[in-house]
Amino acid sequence: MLAAMPPTPPPAPEPGEPRIRDRGDACPGALRLHAADDGRLARLRLPAGRLTARQVEILAHAAETLGDGRISVTSRGNAELRGLADDCGATLAELLADAGLLPSPTHERVRNIVASPTAGLDGLGGPEVQLWARALDSLLCAEPWAAALSGRFLFVLDDGRGDVAGLGGDVTLVAAEPGTVVMYVGGRAFRIAGADAPRAALAAAGAFLDAAREAGNGAWRVRELPEGSAPDVPGALGRAGIAAEPVPPARSLLVLGTPPAPGPLGTGALYVLAPLGRLTAAQLRALLPADEVRLTPWRGAVVVGAAADRLAGLAAHGLITCPDSPGAGVTACTGRPGCAKSLADVRADAAPERPGPARAAGLPVLPVHYSGCERRCGHPHGTWVDVVATADGAYLVDGAPTSRTALTEAVTTARTTTR
């Protein structure tokens, strides 16, 4: 089932007025393919970024037989296939369904669930969020009304370490003391039992849909609801039989935490980054053997069941395996020639910065994202070096005009500047 290009956003509302949409959400999916300049695009929702070994193999096979041979990792830990032919939709759907990557054709675009990728692997946080993600996915797919959620609506499940809590979820669950969780929806927070976490997240999503229908402005996300239209989360939890205690929303819990560094994760797991957020089919296969693979919001992959001695082999495949690599933290949008709106081939221009004294001293550097236009598709959350192509063939680096020849030096300086 192929879809037209996403609708043009409606005009911006006047100050104080809510956004109003009169068209449906055309966010790409595995069945609703998006027409791009380099062919069709499919976006596969992977709750908690999780792939079994068999799914890794089938995804690599789909990329090289139906697409351009690459898999893009999104800022939600999902996967995208590009360069697909116009008539490949049915074949792709059959492959994905056979791999268990398409459990519900009616709900496949609403399975946006990010969870702490290293939960249960490194001794930090609580392991239960990975179980919550699977339970929430099953609950979503089982409820017919949940298909009305936008493909942009996001559930975030944080194991208490704060790594994903700041990713802008519409419903965010943060593990607290043993057996409890704090759920954030809009500007409100509720303490609930950990065992109720998946059902509570589903109930909150239902409360949002009710509020959106009543508001009538076509809101796709909680933050788009007009003032005075907050979801009735307490009522939804009560109807679901879930006890909840309102708590003051601790904003400090919802700041962006530190992502894992490439390398070993405790014992029996590794973390690697995809160069510019994109894996070749061969690089994806190189992650095997593995008990499972978890794609991350930082364009990486956690390889569960892998020993540290595999890092050298993964590096030989071009994967980023250490935190001081110049390519660590460098991402880019599709750019030319794949995107008609892009003003530059940003992936070609996104040369890693020179090592410099900060790298040599082991000091942290900011992430950097190269964008082909002002839309800044796929940019990271929090603070990053903002590199945007301009119509005159140059770039803006954090707002400062920069020629293409001076780009590497400007980005290196910006990444190591104290903010």
Image (cartoon, rainbow, N blue to C red):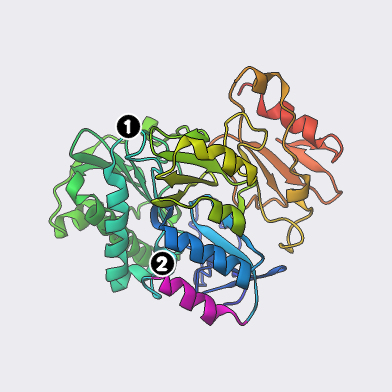
Label 2 residue SS = loop
Q: Residue at x 39, y 56 (%)?
A: 47
Q: Residue at x 39, y 39 (%)?
A: 268
Q: Which residue is mark 2?
A: 216
Q: Residue at x 28, y 54 (%)?
A: 201
Quadrant including the C terminus: top right
Tell me, yes or no, if residue 14 can be seen here: no
Label 1 residue SS = loop
Which numbered disc, 2 or 1, marks the residue closer to the eye? Answer: 1
The image shows residue 328 at horizontal and vertical percentages of 61, 36
Assign the magenta stretch its main secondary structure: helix
Tag 1: residue type? Gly
Q: Which residue is mark 1?
A: 123
Describe residue 155's horizontal placement relative to residue 372 as left or right: left
Tag 2: residue type? Gly
Bounds of the magenta segment = 87-102
